[in-house]
Image (cartoon, coloured by chain):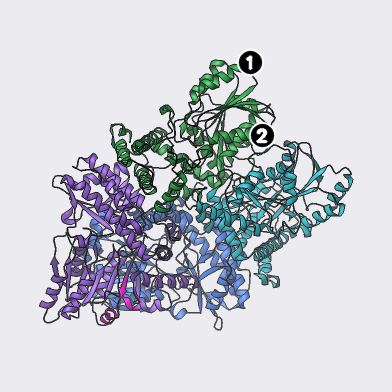
Chain colours: A blue, B cyan, C green, D purple
Amino acid sequence: MNARSPGRHFLQIPGPTDVPGRILRAISEPTIDHRGPEFVGLARSVLTGLKRVFRTNDPVLVFPASGTGAWEAALVNTLSPGETVVMSRTGWFASLWSEMAQRLGLEPILLETDWRRGADPTAIEAALRADKNQRIRAVCVVHNETSTGCVSPIKAVRNAIDAVGHPALLLVDTISSLASIDYRHEDWGVDVTVAGSQKGLMLPPGLSFNAVSARALEASKTARLARSYWDWRPMLEANVGFYFPYTPATNMLRGLQEAVAMLEEEGLRNVFARHDRHAAATRAAVQAWGESGAIELQCQAPTDYSSSLTAVRLAEGYSADALRALILRRFNMSLGNGLGILKDRVFRIGHLGDLNDLSLLGALSGVEMGLNLAGVPCSGGGVDAAMSVLTGADARTA
Amino acid sequence: MNARSPGRHFLQIPGPTDVPGRILRAISEPTIDHRGPEFVGLARSVLTGLKRVFRTNDPVLVFPASGTGAWEAALVNTLSPGETVVMSRTGWFASLWSEMAQRLGLEPILLETDWRRGADPTAIEAALRADKNQRIRAVCVVHNETSTGCVSPIKAVRNAIDAVGHPALLLVDTISSLASIDYRHEDWGVDVTVAGSQKGLMLPPGLSFNAVSARALEASKTARLARSYWDWRPMLEANVGFYFPYTPATNMLRGLQEAVAMLEEEGLRNVFARHDRHAAATRAAVQAWGESGAIELQCQAPTDYSSSLTAVRLAEGYSADALRALILRRFNMSLGNGLGILKDRVFRIGHLGDLNDLSLLGALSGVEMGLNLAGVPCSGGGVDAAMSVLTGADARTA
Amino acid sequence: MNARSPGRHFLQIPGPTDVPGRILRAISEPTIDHRGPEFVGLARSVLTGLKRVFRTNDPVLVFPASGTGAWEAALVNTLSPGETVVMSRTGWFASLWSEMAQRLGLEPILLETDWRRGADPTAIEAALRADKNQRIRAVCVVHNETSTGCVSPIKAVRNAIDAVGHPALLLVDTISSLASIDYRHEDWGVDVTVAGSQKGLMLPPGLSFNAVSARALEASKTARLARSYWDWRPMLEANVGFYFPYTPATNMLRGLQEAVAMLEEEGLRNVFARHDRHAAATRAAVQAWGESGAIELQCQAPTDYSSSLTAVRLAEGYSADALRALILRRFNMSLGNGLGILKDRVFRIGHLGDLNDLSLLGALSGVEMGLNLAGVPCSGGGVDAAMSVLTGADARTA
Amino acid sequence: MNARSPGRHFLQIPGPTDVPGRILRAISEPTIDHRGPEFVGLARSVLTGLKRVFRTNDPVLVFPASGTGAWEAALVNTLSPGETVVMSRTGWFASLWSEMAQRLGLEPILLETDWRRGADPTAIEAALRADKNQRIRAVCVVHNETSTGCVSPIKAVRNAIDAVGHPALLLVDTISSLASIDYRHEDWGVDVTVAGSQKGLMLPPGLSFNAVSARALEASKTARLARSYWDWRPMLEANVGFYFPYTPATNMLRGLQEAVAMLEEEGLRNVFARHDRHAAATRAAVQAWGESGAIELQCQAPTDYSSSLTAVRLAEGYSADALRALILRRFNMSLGNGLGILKDRVFRIGHLGDLNDLSLLGALSGVEMGLNLAGVPCSGGGVDAAMSVLTGADARTA
């Protein structure tokens, strides 16, 4: 039917997230002169605010680009052609990052997983220990794998590197975790943190980030991968005066200023607690539905459950894509699709960004009704279970 | 706590309703010259579109005013000081209208109800029949009483007037029903239809309307209540050329143009069917909660159930206002309060305007959780019951 | 040609004025519950801020209505049927107000002018002095007559009333002067100040105001003109708790809050000085063009020059409406038309609201080019003269 | 003074240009699922519309990036390390592009100019003719040099390449000319056209483009510069189904769709004619001011005058930056600064994007007043001269 879908679209993909009106209004303010005095105030506010969000005193660089660009920036600024990197292949996005490394002329050592848990620090430690000649220059880990809903233990990875005493840099993708799941660039000893605008930061896609440690900066001086747009040096030099080496995405920066303000009005601790609650409620719903045997969490390691999205796996014979299409048509909700080997087997519920209890329950209602209408065996009671979590004893942080 | 409430506010009062972004963007277009050629196009579009929404070929007048202003316009254009009107006092808003009539120097005959059903055509017929000298000049009925969630049978009222052969005009308030519940100004023989912008029309408050029959226009020629701002005559004269006798609310008219377009993209029949489904789902939830005995529908006549809001009545000893305050604080949702004799006893769930299934279920989840947290005995299962309605056999119109 | 007109439309009518984006964005924030706690904060901010703009400690009432509604409110709250009022007929809008008074059953004594100057305090004094029986209950004056660009000396009118010792109330229309031209409700002893949203307050049309003195309030207790929507009493009672007796225009109030903030960020003194400068520059342009003999200021009394608009009069044989049409088509600028006896003879340049030097000069350029293209004898040099004023010795207040 | 600057900021830098409200509103629509069916419609509309703007049937690729990114994409997709390119260094931006080429490992042959004219096809022809071994792989030219206001004759450059029969690719930067100055990717035989969103396309910065000829695509198959984010191949593959290989800047694409619609509503020919007229008017103003001897056009070749910006050169002893600061403070207008060797000697007036006659004249008034206030000898009459051009015989295209 061609008719208008009434009401708010439920954008429950795991990013881009539904951008709050307050940020959309900020983005729609008039474009300003990026070389004028007003811009300096904006850039100062954004560049200092980002450090608080990344939990670091290190510089955070802002690229007018998708998150994929920040992956590239992390690699080309720190590495040289032919160098070896260890990459934990925890899912689709980790795979894409490793393919990028190969295209750029690097030689990744791939640590495979079953895509149902986070990276394994022990495997990383073993790989480093085996690297007697210290040919490995970097360890690359995706903090929150958006395709599987599994989190990797970054601090443990750092500890693993330190245990070996290996000089490899630690590069971490936080595209779908930053500002949703507790993350500490500095405390956890990360060298380059990669992030994007369209997830926990609640902005449209179009900005990406590198937080850069002193060691990473030092490495960039000798790194020989060709770079210009992604080059940290001119960016850092221009940022000293709160300018940029090329035209920045001014309107997006204005939205980012608002996003940082909103995160700090709520309090980052509260933001993380809210995501934890919503994830727990979502898992309770999935587990209730799953008593039928046809539905389960993709993530099998409770320690690795993601607080920003939940990937739900259907039994063989049921099509996740058909389910998603039905839910979009009937309930005006977008869910994330299964990627790579999870295609049509998994759908993903994004519960990150500017979300509250009632919107989450609306979304879970849509999934529960959709499962029933699609004929996927579903035990029901998922929304009830989610409500119990949200009003339960643990809900005191609300 | 002073912290930011994350996510979308659930504005589930029975109007103003949550204005869709598309209309908000239309309203935020630059203000135009209300005497220029561009304005003519806008006014033509709005004035002809409104006729389709009111289901009439009669003129529809637009006042820059709240709905209360359109009440006044209906009275002062058709009546003279000291004249008698019959008013069915079906709730708080019907009462306010009757007080206005008194303040304006009219003499209302009040037909009382218990606020748990719509107007009684039999009582109206009896009043008219008793009026041997035809001193009654108008019958005033509220189509959908926003304080109780009860609908009055307008066609039956018209039939009652006709059965007596009484010349009284029929004035109908559709403030919370127009564009939500099936309503037909012309077919049902209504003389003046009163409406406002902030409910089914999905706009902010600030515009109100009179649809005016030929008989009402004729009556206005001899009506002697003082009037200037509300005077139909100069308005109708100016509207011929698609202008207004004083500065119209241009930006709101632009929003109204968009609202009419959205209603017609969805199709008015679909709009009504959607409201009917949502009301049925809401009542199913209330009835499920109410098995405990502490919760019931305010409306006791199934024929009179409102499709735009549901008023929920708590047993004595439970405070509806305390419940609403808890739900606002915990779940960022506004519910309607009890008015007049229903104060603190009733809360009202608005399910009109630009709403879809998942937002409704989010809202109902918030009520169910709120009842539990507030200690109101509640049998649970309300959201489940609502989902059943929304996915049930009757749901085919979705 | 049906093609898009590029660039910003120049809305140089004397109101509605071009609404700043900041206010449009505020208006497009989500509609909120007008009975909830958030609304109280908004209403408190607006109601107290308005007092500073009107320069008074008296209450300022806000009606969801056009300015015409506030005219009516001023009359119906203070007067009784058949009572006499003195009205200075200084132009089209003063005439409309007097017609309204007649329609409402009042008996205006009309003090005529030639529409080329403001009200004459001497004539008002004479009328009051002649009123031995004190039948006159109110003196009505338009502060800034929007149809002529002439200002009336309100303080002198107050002095004239006081000189006679007459108890008549002083009602003043400041629709096109408030927040543009220095105005002092309290210092000048005004009893009711009438204002609207769409001029100096930089909002779209849709709100209007009454500032009300203690004497006016006292008069309202015995005034017998019928009133309900416009009744001050329930409004003042509800405003105590920062609520309204009927649904307020919430989104407009949010815009008003922003407007008051913007006025105070600039400083009201600076706002007035800016309007004075722009008016002086505009008159310099008109006088330069007028050396040809075909163009002159409508206002002939330099003491009465308006700072918010300039009405320009063409010699007989030239059509102001043809000129305006040409300018709209060629230069995408709307100018005000001549009203009543000034139809087609006068065009009006609005220079009020959120305007700066360069936009004013753009507008004056459009008029100068338009005069030339329309074949109106025009000496040229108008824009140059305006630039001289704007950069001249007097320009130090810039 | 810290007070608010009233009125609209005049953003007269040569890009970013003042984004029309219609596009800002489009950008502020909710972010949508970039893998859903609604997105396909948006991407189809944009990708086909862009071809009409670039005047080509070749694919146009969209990168979430600043224009600088599209420079990099043009180079890395077509060239291999150590290869030679001819670059005409016509100004600051041409210089930056050549520095980028060097950083990426290319060996540019730099053809120097005095920065007061466009590229010299004769010099390019000579360089190619001297390249007996056809080591030159590409000729890089900036169509409209934003730092100088000089246009390069792209068709003549193509002819020069063809005259020699040299196989070098032709790469052209149209960042500040596309959609402002007539440009024809296909007719003129360009292999890669580089463009950005924030100039003639009237969007905020954040998108950039490559239009790609079949020869360029062929070259990309053997080009060996490392690339991933900028790689054409996966982008073209995904674009077949109207998707993107990584998260596109959805909200910007929605704005772009609106921008293309606006350009086509006006008509590209009209858009170009408008820019030509505005440039002619601006030069007339500069020439009038320059009779004093202290002010002249930076561009010295009338055939190379830019229609999108005019760079104005001050005599020694006068500071263009002090002038710009004064104009920003006094008149709320941003002008472009002098770059590189033109620092403080030149200021630039942008007259591209969504601009009309009156806004241009407002801007020129600001410059004329600023020159006077800054004490730069200025003959006056510039605005008058501009008005003459805009209303002159040549103005018939208006």
At x 54%, y 36%, the residue is C92
Q: Residues within 10 Å of mark 1 (few under 14, many from 20)?
A: few
Give the left or right position of residue C122, taking residue A71 as reference: right
Q: Is residue D212 magenta?
A: yes
Give the left or right position of residue C163, taking residue C371 as reference: right
Residue extending furthest bottom?
A317
Q: Nearer the viewer, residue B335 or D52?
A: D52
| Residue B59, x across and y down, in percent | 66, 53
- Give the numbered dot on residue C104: 2
| Residue B131, x across and y down, in percent | 87, 44
Pointer 2 indicates a residue of which chain? C
Q: Nearer the viewer, residue B199 or A43?
A: B199
Q: Is residue D15 something one can see in this rendering?
A: no
Vertical order, A371 against D377 (above or below) = below
* Amino acid residing under circle 1: Lys
State which quarter of the image contains the C terminus of chain D: bottom left
- Give the numbered dot on residue A225: none
Badge 2 element: loop
Q: Nearer the viewer, residue C60 or B256?
A: B256
User: Mark 1 and mark 2 in contact (Cβ < 8 Å)?
Assistant: no
Give the left or right position of residue C183, taking residue D131 as reference: right
* Amino acid residing under circle 2: Leu
Q: Earlier in the sequence, mark 2 or mark 1?
A: 2
State which quarter of the image contains the N terminus of chain D: top left
Residue named by callout 1? C132
At x 67%, y 62%, the residue is B275
Write the start and end of the magenta stretch as one range.
Answer: D210-233
